[in-house]
Amino acid sequence: MLKIRKTTPQDANILADMAAALNAHFGVSAPPYDGCALAPALQGEDPLVFGYLAEDDTGHPVGYALCQRFFDTDTGTLATWLLDIFIVTEHRGGGLGRRLLARIAADAKQKGQRCIGLAVYESNPARRLYDRIGAALPENALVYELRDENLDRLAQEAQI
């Protein structure tokens, strides 16, 4: 039986390794990082980054989901943004992704939130799961990223 538990700062290296596996799965050549970069964000009573880790009977990690809170200007309330969700190949298709999302939903509802947001690659088969649980694409919504050289270039325009 798979066990799902809240992440802790001590899980940072495991989570960083699984994030690297997620990036590799989608061919994303993001620079690798280790748990030292993630651990501070997982600390505290209400951490910046929080999530759940799925483990098999031996305690071996087989999946994770990481989130962070944000202020939803559509509803005027705090909400949760799903940063990552990843299940190792041999545990896909068995409902683990849904169980992780259910834990995140229960956490959000307990905190009085009305929304979980996420972005997904168009080619990601997990889109079927998002459709089944009732997640919807906001009309005409796109997700943009501004990073690396483009972020540097724009920041140089600031008149501070």
Image (cartoon, rainbow, N blue to C red):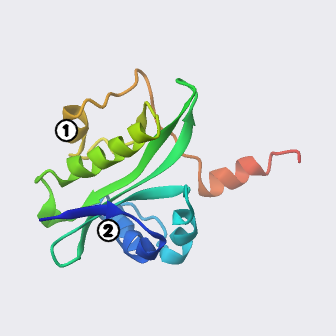
Q: Residues within 10 Å of mark 2 (few under 14, many from 20)?
A: some
Callout 1: SS: helix
Q: Label 2, on which residue?
A: 21
Callout 2: SS: helix
Image position, residue 155 (x, y; %): 75, 50
Image position, residue 48 (x, y; %): 56, 56
Image position, residue 88 (x, y; %): 21, 65
Compared with 157, 94 (above or below) is below
Q: Residue at 52% across / 71% down in the picture?
A: 39
Kindly identify the amino acid type of the residue bearing the numbered disc 1: Arg
Q: Residue at 11% across / 52% down in the picture?
A: 93
Q: Nearer the viewer, residue 154 or 89?
A: 89
Q: Nearer the viewer, residue 23 or 74?
A: 74
The answer to which quarter of the image holds residue 90 is bottom left
Q: Is residue 83 left or right of residue 64?
A: right
Kindly identify the amino acid type of the residue bearing the numbered disc 2: Ala
The answer to which quarter of the image holds residue 92 is bottom left
The answer to which quarter of the image holds residue 51 is bottom left
Q: Is residue 85 left or right of residue 91?
A: right
Point out the residue furthest to the top here.
139
Alpha-carbon distance for marks 2 and 1?
A: 21 Å
Q: Residues within 10 Å of mark 1 (few under 14, many from 20)?
A: few
Which quadrant does the N terminus fall into?
Answer: bottom left
**Residue 128's disc number:** 1
Compared with 50, 118 (above or below) is above
Q: Earlier in the sequence, mark 2 or mark 1?
A: 2
Residue 120 in view of the camera: no
Count of numbered circles in the view: 2
